[in-house]
Each structure stands twice: as structure tokens, then as C-alpha cells.
Image (spheres, rainbow, N blue to C red):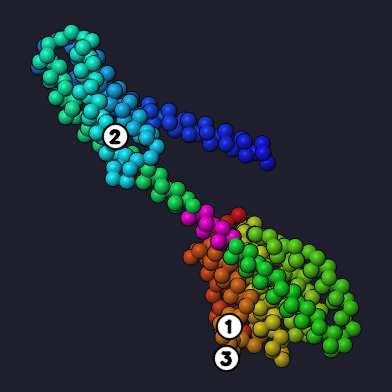
């Protein structure tokens, strides 16, 4: 852990150093551009050498850049009555006459020339510094906005992961309790198949339970769970349950939330076939239509009851998981079958 933290610290330090060098290079480039532009502006009234003029403007530009950068970090704390950017602009303005005075003392030249240079530099330098301050504040604001957006996106992702984890935690006990209730019903009736069914259930749960906690599954893996589940249910009520599957082979690799198909089939068994005295049939149709996948589970059981309130725990949880993973690109629809029964459809993106 110490090595990892040290490496992260070195990377952060290197990134800061690169950022400082890049900012310094940009400032020097801007200073040189303004210096050359200033020289071109006053080259006609300048009586001395043009080389001296451009050398003087470049020195003034570098002097202004130095003053701007120096008062950006010093002093570390300022009185409340003054802003740092004000100090920087004033410092740049004051650096111009001081630099010109020093150059005038060291370099011979007409006073008229130095007065022109002084007037022009004092006029342009503070405005250039002010423009630099505004630009840097805008860049900082954009950086902060991007940082806040990234942080918000990360928090939203964490909240989504937590919500999905909670929903998956709700799926497992709901599925197990319903399945065990079916076994209990078989045992209570004294069926000779109870022992066989219990052994099959144990083997089935060994394969099914670990997959309940995985973040994603495929249609093919869902079918591996649904087939033994329907076999178990058919062993429980052999005269009251028939089923058939019609699955498009191109849809087998489509990814979906775990237990999507199992939830639909279990809902058909519990709320459709079980309450019906005659039993019924369950048809599973899965098709891939371009970039979409349609999962349809139809039962000819008891049908929708007027007193039913909502979708129930299984379908409600499945709808929420689909919304969290796919957003508005997926939806679950429940309709009455003809002449009786229920049709449940899931439309979702065909992601592989």
C-alpha cells in the first residue's frame, strides 16, 4: 500500500509539474506575440534601430509575465480588501515604467523613443494582464464544471450499483421462498414424487443460486435455469402444466439482467397455472429483431384478477432492474391473454 501511495504521489507531482510548464510556455508565447505586435504598432514613430525596438518590447513582455506569475503565488495570503487578480494587474502596470527606466539607463537612445514605448506599454500591458486573468478564470471554471460533472457521474454510478445490488438481494429470497413453497405443497399432498422433486430441486438450486448475484446474464444462461425449473413444476403437477419454447438462435447471446426469464416464467406458474383448476400452458417466445430483443411469456392460466394491485414483487423488481440498466430503452408490458391467461413482454436492447 505504501508503494502504491508513493507511486500515486509521484504521478500527481509529475502531472502538476507538466501543467505548470505548459502554463508557463503559453504565457511566454502570449507575451512574445504581444511584444512583437506592440513593436509593429510603434515602428513608424520609432527613430532608433528597429532591432532595439523589438528587443525592448520583448524584454517588457517578459518582465510583465514575470510580475504576473510572481504575484500569482506571493504573498500566500492577501488581505480581504484586495483580490489577487487586482494585485497582478497593478503589478504588471507598475513593472512597465520600472523596466523602461532600467533599459533607458543601460541603453542609449532618444528620449522621444522611450516616451512612446513607455506610453504604449503602460496602456497595453494592464489590459493584456486583465484579459489573461479573465481567460484563466474561465478555464478554471470549465475545469471545475468538468470535475463536478465527473464526480456527479461517479456518484450516480455508485448509487445505481447500490440500487441494483439491493434489487438482486430482493430477487434471491423471493425466488427461493416461492420455490420452497411449491415443494411444501407437494409434500403436504403426500405425493410419492416429493423425494425425487426435492433432490432435483437441490441440484437445481446449486446451479441457480450463484447466478442470482451476477451483474449480467445471457438468454442462453437464462434458458438453462428455466428448463429445469419447468421440469420441476411439471413433476409437481403433471396433468395441469404443459410448456413449449420457441427461441431465436440469434438471441442466445443477448445480455439481460439475471433471472429475467425465470421471473417471467415463475410469475406465470404462480399466478397463472397454480390458481387455475384446469391448469394451463406456458409458451416462451424469444426473438431478436435487429437491435432489439423481445421476450414473451404467455400462459393460459387464471388470467388477470380485477382485485390484483400492480405487478407483484417479481415483475415490479424486474421492471425496476430493466429501467436502471437500460433506461427508457427497455420496458415490461403485461396484458390479458385471449380467451384467458396473461401475456408478459419484455422489450430491451439486443446487447451482446
Q: Is residue 106 visible?
A: yes
Question: From which residue to which does the magenta span run?
Answer: 152-161
- How many neighbours does mark 2 have within 10 angstroms: few (below 14), some (14-19), or many (20 or more)? many
Which one is closest to the eye, mark 1 or mark 2? 2
Instruction: Assess disc 3: are there few (<14), some (14-19) or many (≥20) residues with their C-alpha within 10 Å of its C-alpha.
Output: few
Disc nearer the start of the sequence (1/3): 3
Q: Nearer the viewer, residue 127 or 192?
A: 127
> Which of the two residues, 224 or 315, is positioned nearer the viewer here?
315
The answer to which of 285 and 148 lies nearer the viewer is 148
- Name the image quarter holding the N terminus: top right
Nearer the N terminus, badge 2 or badge 3? 2
Residue 337 disc label: 1
Relative to 317, 149 lies left or right: left
Mark 3, secondary structure of its residue? loop
Quadrant hosting residue 39: top left
Quarter of the image for residue 254 reads bottom right
Would you identify the image quadrant in which residue 21 lies?
top left
Height in image: 8 above or below 226? above
The single residue placed furthest to the front in the displayed view is 79
**Is 89 colored magenta in this rendering?**
no
**Residue, disc 3:** 307
The reply to whether dot 2 and dot 3 touch (C-beta < 8 Å) is no
For discs 1 and 3, the disc positioned in front in the rendered view: 3
Question: Which of marks 2 and 1 precedes in the sequence?
Answer: 2
What is the x, y in percent for residue 329?
50, 63
Q: Can residue 280 be spotted in the picture?
A: no
**Residue 263: horizontal and vertical position, in percent?**
66, 73
Amino acid at each position: 500500500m505504501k508503494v502504491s501511495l508513493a507511486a500515486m504521489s509521484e504521478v500527481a507531482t509529475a502531472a502538476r509539474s507538466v501543467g505548470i510548464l505548459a502554463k508557463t510556455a503559453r504565457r511566454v508565447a502570449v507575451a512574445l506575440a504581444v511584444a512583437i505586435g506592440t513593436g509593429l504598432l510603434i515602428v513608424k514613430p520609432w527613430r532608433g534601430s528597429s532591432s532595439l525596438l523589438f528587443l525592448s518590447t520583448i524584454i517588457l513582455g517578459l518582465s510583465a509575465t514575470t510580475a504576473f506569475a510572481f504575484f500569482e503565488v506571493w504573498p500566500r495570503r492577501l488581505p480581504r480588501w484586495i483580490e489577487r487578480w487586482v494585485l497582478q494587474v497593478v503589478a504588471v502596470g507598475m513593472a512597465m515604467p520600472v523596466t523602461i527606466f532600467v533599459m533607458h539607463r543601460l541603453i542609449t537612445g532618444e528620449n522621444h523613443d522611450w516616451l512612446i514605448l513607455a506610453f504604449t506599454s503602460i496602456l497595453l500591458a494592464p489590459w493584456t494582464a486583465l484579459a489573461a486573468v479573465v481567460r484563466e478564470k474561465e478555464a478554471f471554471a470549465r475545469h471545475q464544471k468538468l470535475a463536478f460533472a465527473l464526480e456527479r457521474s461517479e456518484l450516480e454510478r455508485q448509487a445505481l450499483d447500490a440500487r441494483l445490488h439491493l434489487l438482486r438481494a430482493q430477487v434471491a429470497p423471493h425466488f427461493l421462498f416461492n420455490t420452497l413453497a411449491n415443494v411444501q405443497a407437494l409434500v403436504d399432498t403426500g405425493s410419492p414424487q416429493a423425494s425425487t422433486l426435492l433432490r432435483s430441486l437441490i441440484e437445481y438450486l446449486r446451479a441457480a443460486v450463484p447466478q442470482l448475484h451476477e451483474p449480467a446474464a445471457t438468454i442462453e444462461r437464462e434458458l438453462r435455469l428455466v428448463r429445469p425449473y419447468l421440469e420441476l413444476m411439471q413433476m409437481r403437477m403433471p396433468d395441469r402444466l404443459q410448456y413449449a419454447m420457441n427461441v431465436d438462435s440469434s438471441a442466445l447471446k443477448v445480455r439481460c439482467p439475471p433471472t429475467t426469464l425465470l421471473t417471467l416464467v415463475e410469475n406465470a406458474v404462480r399466478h397463472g397455472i397454480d390458481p387455475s383448476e384446469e391448469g394451463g400452458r406456458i409458451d416462451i417466445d424469444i426473438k431478436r429483431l435487429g437491435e432489439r430483443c423481445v421476450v414473451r411469456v404467455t400462459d393460459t392460466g387464471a388470467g388477470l384478477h380485477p382485485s390484483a394491485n400492480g405487478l407483484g414483487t417479481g415483475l415490479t423488481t424486474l421492471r425496476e432492474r430493466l429501467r436502471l440498466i437500460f433506461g427508457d430503452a427497455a420496458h415490461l408490458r403485461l396484458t390479458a391473454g385471449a380467451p384467458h391467461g396473461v401475456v408478459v413482454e419484455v422489450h430491451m436492447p439486443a446487447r451482446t
